[in-house]
Image: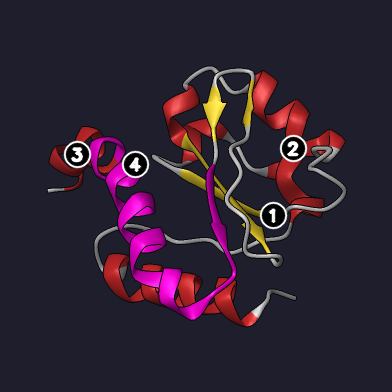
Amino acid sequence: MFSTFKQEIIEALKETYSGKCFVRIDSLRNLDEISEEEFSSIIIMDENQADMNFDLSLKSKIRDTKDKTKLILLITNRDGQERSFSYNGVDAITTASAKEKKDLTLTAIKRRIAPNLAKVTPLLK
């Protein structure tokens, strides 16, 4: 379902946040079932194809989400070129699907999760 690179990112995130928050892994097909109110952060992973024409359900989710800081969009590129993508106020983290980019990618994702998790962490105690 996911590339090796994305799977490694997912496993590292699960390891980091296990016991700290609920982690749900799902596909873009079920994106419309994910409620903004249920999660402090929603990480969406996709791959750049044909110069990134966003999936319609992805565009809809971005447009309909009130708190855009909850959306963390990771776009990978197989060709290794760095690109930037932004849609309706959401800037994507973009990276080549390369093992040497894993730590930088994880750090970028964690930086976006941290303020969202801080908002709800006092409520969990």
The numbered dot on residue 31 is none
- Magenta stretch, main secondary structure, is helix
Q: Are marks 4 and 1 in contact (CB under 8 Å)?
A: no
Q: Looking at the picture, how far across and down is residue 63, in whole percent?
A: 68, 20
Q: Which mark is residue 46?
A: 1
Q: Label 4: which residue?
A: 112
Callout 1 touching callout 2 (CB < 8 Å): yes
Residue type indicated by callout 3: Ala
What residue is shown at x 63% (from left), y 18% (from top)?
88
Kindly identify which residue carries mark 3.
118
Q: Amino acid at mark 4?
A: Arg
Residue plotted at (19% across, 39% down)? 118
Label 2 crowd bin: few (<14), some (14–19), many (20+), radius 10 Å:
some
Of badges 3 and 1, the one in the foreground is: 1
Spatial separation of the CA atoms under disc 3 and disc 4: 11 Å
> Residue at horizontal 12%, vertical 48%?
125
The numbered mark, 3 or 1, whose residue comes first in the sequence reads 1
Label 1: few (<14), some or many (≥20) within 10 Å?
Answer: many
Number of marks in picture: 4
> Height in image: 9 above or below 52?
below
Residue 58 image label: 2
Q: Horizontally, is 29 left or right of 77 in the view?
A: right
Counting residues from the N terminus, which is met first, the one under dot 4 or under dot 1? 1
Query: For the point 48% across and 79% down, which residue is it?
Result: 99
> Is 37 in front, or is 42?
42
User: The residue tagged with tag 1: helix, strand or loop?
Assistant: strand
**On screen, 42 above or below 5?**
above
> Label 3 to label 1, Cα distance in Å?
26 Å
Report whether 88 appears left or right of 67. Answer: right
Judging depth in this view, the residue of 85 and 80 nearest the camera is: 80
Give the mark, 3 or 4, whose residue is nearer the N terminus.
Answer: 4
